[in-house]
Amino acid sequence: MNEQMVNDIVQEVLAKLQISESPSGKHGVFVEMEDAVQAAKAAQKVVRNMSMDQREKIISNIRKKTKENAETIARMGVQETGMGNVGDKILKHLLVAEKTPGTEDITTTAWSGDRGLTLLEMGPFGVIGAITPSTNPSETVICNSIGMIAGGNTVVFNPHPQAVKTTIFAINMINEASLEAGGPDNVACTVEKPTVATSNYMMKHKDIQLLVATGGTGVVTTVLSSGKKGIGAGAGNPPALVDETADIRKAAQDIVNGCTFDNNLPCIAEKEVVAVSSIMDELMHYMLTEQGCYLASREEQDKLAKTVITEKGALNRKCVGRSAKVLLSMIGVEVPDNIRCIIFEGEKEHPLITTELMMPILGIVRAKDFDDAVEKAVWLEHGNRHSAHIHSKNVDNITRYAKAIDTAILVKNGPSYAALGFGGEGYATFTIASRTGEGLTSAKSFTKCRRCVMTDSLCIR
Ligand code: NAD
């Protein structure tokens, strides 16, 4: 038996001792934020000393349990928040389970030479404070937890109050996975009743070393004003640009597939289209005849705008993540079940186009040429630098658009969800740090850089 194996057994025994002392006995869920932070801190001491192999065992078990519970959590999320649809939420959980990077994401940089060996090692921050959205509650919690634990951290979540049950289910599941794999309880913690007060308490807590905010502009700004290191994954309003060189029929299909995925909840999803005038009618024709779209009249657009946006300009939460059929029924229009998206032609200033709706309502803006289309799309993205999409076969156009819009994600000739590794290459994440520049976060985003220097030895070149 080598030293590592002895260490592993000691960690396992320590973890078991800790379970019996767990104050709530509810696997990571506490009444007071202080208790949640202290439990995560105790768990981090254990995780910190675990081998990478042991951390990976916990992560594999989280993946396994996420797959087993995908349908249960998906149903719970839809039931609790009223947003999205079960089929797509199952796919999102399977995606998180399969494609969120683990410990393999954390790599070391080395320099060796006459003066010795220097390593850049990525170490844990400690206890991370994470704030999660109502739109992908459990997906974000599971995705963040995998990456954060891979980095040797533990995490305290302050979830959206409208998604507490679903979040608690996910947190219980993560801790059960850790315990079963020989890890500690409380690798992910939360409070029974998250509020702005518990969030503030967590943000100011001396034992929280890194804050990660996934949500709208308000929460990201709050986290970035905290005086601590913050990762800010904020709002988007992704435009899909279509030029005259695109495969128009496929563009119609990709855009509607992306826009309607989980009823348009993902922050990366197509929120509006900018099409050059010469192909705009053809694009709308395919959307209407082949992609289950409903063309809203001017009067219906006005009714929809009054229904989905409040007088103060906020979103009506009862409309976010609802299907096209439900949204239309709210304005007295009954449509068959195959209708999945509401489309119309409008100016870029139209409230249903300029607002990040998170509903399958897709306004289409006419541009006189490619330059005009780029200008309109950049304006509509509102400087979030989050996500944008393009359908074009002209690489010069694609390059110009990419430089002008400057977003963390740019999908070319595919549905937006390809950016999450769903029908596209690359890993998955539900925290896209548009504001602070990490882009698609993964385990390495939750580590800090440490330089280890050995002078004059260990170079064997
Ligand atoms: P939201 O901003 O209403 O809430 C997000 C989280 O922040 C919740 O936990 C909420 O309780 C908390 N919160 C809000 N204001 C706060 C404040 N002032 N102080 C502390 N906590 C605060 O967002 P939502 O409606 O749940 O989610 C949708 C929004 O999140 C959209 O704008 C979407 O684009 C964005 N989003 C971004 C990403 C990303 O990766 N960039 C991912 C998902 C969602």
Image (cartoon, rainbow, N blue to C red):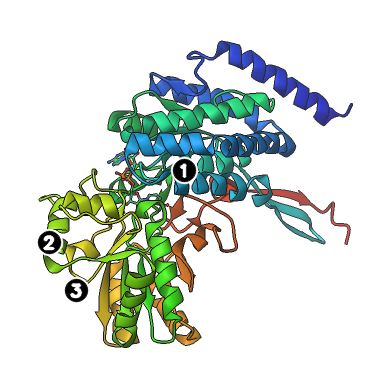
Which one is earlier in the sequence, the residue at label 2 or at label 3? Answer: 2
> Within 10 angstroms of label 3, few (less than 14), some, or many (20 or more) residues?
some
Mark 3 or 1 closer to N-term? 1
Mark toward the start of the polypeptide (1 vs 2):
1
Task: Look at the image and tell me whether residue 140 can be seen.
Answer: yes
Residue to which mark 3 is pinned: 347
- Horizontally, residue 296 falls left or right of residue 148, namely left
On the question of residue 160 being in view, the answer is no
Secondary structure at numbered mark 3: loop
Asked if the beta carbon under badge 1 is closer than 8 A to the nearest atom of ligand 1, the reply is yes
The residue at 66%/16% (across/down) is 16
Nearer-the-camera pick, 327 or 156: 327
Question: Which residue in the structure is indicated by mark 2?
Answer: 302
- Looking at the rendered structure, the kind of residue marked 3 is Glu
Separation of marks 2 and 3 at Cα, in angstroms = 13 Å
The one nearer the camera, 179 or 250, is 250
For label 1, the residue is: 140
